[in-house]
Amino acid sequence: MSAIDLVIGPQHPALHEPERFVFKVEGETVVDVEPRIGYVHRGIEKALENRDYVTGLYLAERVCGICNVAHSLCFVQAMEDICGIEPPERAKYLRVVAHELNRIHSHLLLLGVAGELLGFMTLFMLIWRDREDVMDLIERLTGNRVNSAFNVVGGVRRDLDPKLAEDLKKVLERLKAKVKRYREVFAEDPTIRARTVGVGLLSRSRAIDLCAVGPTCRASGVKADVREYRPYAAYEDLDFKLVWYEEGDVWARLMARVDETIEAIELVERALEKMPSGPVRVKAPRTIPRGEGFSVVEAPRGDLNYHVYGKGDVKPDRVKIRTPTYANIPAVCEMFKGGYIADIPATLVSIDPCFACTDRVTLVDMEKGTRRTVSVTELLRRR
Amino acid sequence: MVGLPSMLKEVLSNVFKRPFTVKYPYQRLEPPDGFRGRHAVDWSKCIGCGVCARDCPAFAIELVEVEGRRYPLIDLAKCIFCYQCADSCPRGAITPTKVFELATWRKEDLLVKPEKYEA
Amino acid sequence: MKEEEVVEALKGVLGPSLVESSVVKSGRVRLVVEPGAHRRAIEALKSKFGEVHLFSIVGADLRDRLELTYNLWLYEPKVHVMLKTSLPLDQAEVETVTDLIPGSILYEREVYEMLGVRFRGHPNLKRLFLPEDWPEGVYPLRKDIKLEGVL
């Protein structure tokens, strides 16, 4: 039978972000896919060349709302790399606390969204209720729920008061018990297993060839986590344990995220115990000297890196941002092939797509068949 | 046969609980300390240096002249509430408040302006 | 030291094509190669040091030349290699590495559309981010570009 083109996006209820996919399908099986991205391209790399690092920091933070602490931390570390500044010890521990709280809220967001796309609305509502506790903690620590503006070149902006440290421990302990309960649900619920086990397979060798990052590659057996192979901030002293799975399907990717949430809660507890006292900020010169800086951090979706060129002025010469979802696009194209149309939402949500970071991706599958658009209601029924 | 739904216990217990909704505006939640709301400027401390306007990422601060001295005029419509102005001010003249209900009918109400300033 | 091993191994393979090499700091090696020699360098790194992860491909317009940097992570020795080559502004063409590292397929498209570097042998060298009605030949990240009134 001849193949037809199935266009999904850029606005579609199965997708939470704008991107366009053109799938080539034969019957119910997806044969090929081509991405088309760039719907939210904002020209941030060019804009950062016109701003000094004090104002540019706020622009870099707004590349992505969900992983904003990771973006600001990576930008700040790249600037500290060029300028040769070392932040104080207490600032490094506070950066770990904010970074891990960001990771907890991002993973809970994704697990809820995965539940919603699989049709499990109750799980979505309950997980997002628990996520509100984490958002309240982030608001007390940094002043804002999203776009925290916590990191600056030379340290962090605010200190942690002892009352907040007590509340952090209490709330996170309650949250850990709930996340362990959700782990049981994801691991054993028969409906979730029926829709996710064996779906969207990615083998270990393909994951390495396609340079997949984050939980997408760790669920395929690649033991790569920036916090382990290239520790930054205070991760060397915090006894970090890597989370990985071997199966390489959607189930393994969701389980990897649940386990990482539990590990993140424990990291915050350890960081609060070991936090040294001292200043939280050092003064930094405004000029960026000639040279290059590079910094890589583990954002919730994978490894995020910034490469900065300086020219001796207050403004940088070139800033290059490589976000994790951008690196996972070739891997997700590989995962779609050979699966059913009905598995498309589950596979896509398992890489935790954040196209605001990526500046759009479209998957397009082209063969010589006819082009036919499938209406929204037809696709919803197929889910 | 699928078996008992795994979240049955949570679902049944939530049937008998109060909803978590806060009936705003009849009930209000207090923002935490350090919340970044509307700016409060101590005009007696301001020396008119202009560092706040230079460092604003959204170009929301402009220096205007009132009675021979220069003061900042903050346009909250452009402001992103990052408070870099407060960090940069050498005298600590800008501090945050907890006021976040800023919606209004006139754009002139969205300016934080010195006392005797006329547009 | 692991960084020295990487430098020595590449000196052996590339010879005079390796223009500069230095250990910038602990865990980071900077290598500058002649244009066209970057494929041999990546093949040598893959064969001698095992699995290689590509962090990014950075293109920069340095006013007198274009510079391409391949940021590579070697898993085994835990070393970050910055592999750089320079290209002339008026003739920016270089060989692709998509057969050596399949994950570089979208990075090269982005460098092509933003800076105008053609990658010979790329399977699908088209635009990635810019809209369809963006004019041809206008490369946004070049320094001599005027972006007012383009679209």
Image (spheres, coloured by chain):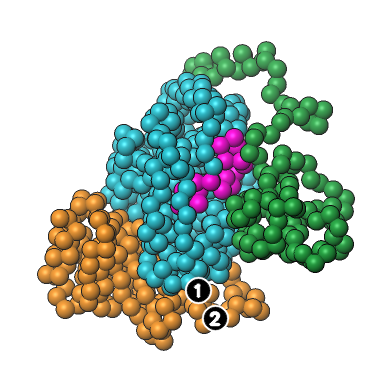
Chain colours: A cyan, B green, C orange
Q: Inspect this view and state whether residue B54 appears.
A: yes
Q: Residue at x 64, y 53 (%)?
A: B91
Q: Which residues are magenta?
A: A139-157
Total numbered circles: 2
Residue A270: where, in percent of width, then height? 39, 30
Neighbor class of circle 2 (other Cα within 10 Å; few <14, some 14-19, many 20+) is few
Locate the C terminus of chain A by quadrant.
top right
**Res. A372 image quadrant:** bottom right
Neighbor class of circle 1 (other Cα within 10 Å; few <14, some 14-19, many 20+) is many
Give yes or no for residue A149 being in the magenta stretch. yes
**Most foreground residue, C29 or C15:** C29
For the residue marked with disc 2, what is the amino acid? Answer: Ile
Q: Residue at x 41, y 68 (%)?
A: A289
Residue A382: where, in percent of width, then height? 57, 40
Residue C14: where, in percent of width, then height? 16, 73
Question: The disc numbered 2 marks a residue on which chain?
Answer: C
Q: Is residue A351 above or below residue A263?
A: below
Q: Residue at x 78, y 41 (%)?
A: B101
Q: Tell me the SS state at disc 1.
A: loop
Give yes or no for residue C139 being in the magenta stretch. no
- Tell me the CA gap for discs 2 and 1: 8 Å
State the residue position of label 1: C141
Residue A164: where, in percent of width, then height? 54, 29
For the residue marked with disc 1, what is the amino acid? Answer: Leu
Task: Indicate left or right for A193 with C136 as reference.
Answer: left
Question: The disc numbered 1 marks a residue on which chain?
Answer: C
**Most foreground residue, A198 or B67:** B67
State the residue position of label 2: C145
Labels 2 and 1 touching (C-beta < 8 A): yes
Q: Tell me the SS state at disc 2.
A: loop
